[in-house]
Amino acid sequence: MADWSTTHLGEIEDVAGWVPVRRQLGIEAFGINAWLTRCDGIVIVPHEEIPTGHEEVYFVVKGHATFVLGGQEIEARGGWIVDVPYP
């Protein structure tokens, strides 16, 4: 068995816009998922991580995305990484 793996987002089953990358690759050290744009243009619905304390990192692969963090709008284009270290 190889000590590495590869996949393409298109090869992982899409669950209503959520792509469970971690599950597909068997990653246990950290969480990693992908989100696809829905037909209404929304990728991730507004939410807060306060109950869980999870930090989040978003990587815009292509196109662009608008993030609203602490009431401030941030425009991120393909290649941008947005780090939200604490809720």
Image (cartoon, helix red, strand yellow):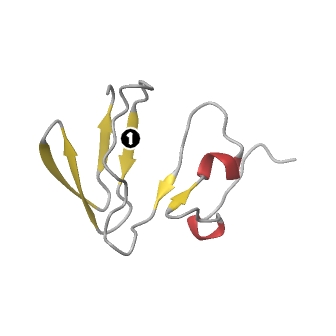
> At x 13% / y 40%, what residue is drawn?
71
> At x 57% / y 33%, what residue is drawn?
30
Report the side of 42 relative to 70 (left or right): right
Image mark count: 1
Query: Closest to the observer: 18 or 11?
Result: 18
Residue 64, position in %: x, y?
26, 64
Report the side of 64 relative to 8 (left or right): left
Report the side of 13 relative to 65 (left or right): right
Q: Amino acid at mark 1?
A: Val
Query: Closest to the observer: 71 or 33?
Result: 71
Quarter of the image with the C terminus in it: top left
Circle 1 SS class:
strand
Q: Quadrant of residue 60?
A: bottom left
Residue 17, position in %: x, y?
49, 63
> At x 11% / y 43%, what residue is drawn?
72
Callout 1 environment at 10 Å: few (<14), some (14 to 19), or many (20+)? Answer: few
Residue 76, position in %: x, y?
23, 55
Seen from this angle, which residue lies furthest left? Answer: 72
Query: Closest to the observer: 60 or 54?
Result: 54
> At x 35% / y 53%, what residue is drawn?
45
Q: Quadrant of residue 86?
A: top left
Seen from this angle, which residue lies furthest bottom? Answer: 39
Residue 12, position in %: x, y?
64, 63
The residue singled out by tag 1 in the image is 57
Say if 63 sits above or below 45 in the image.
below
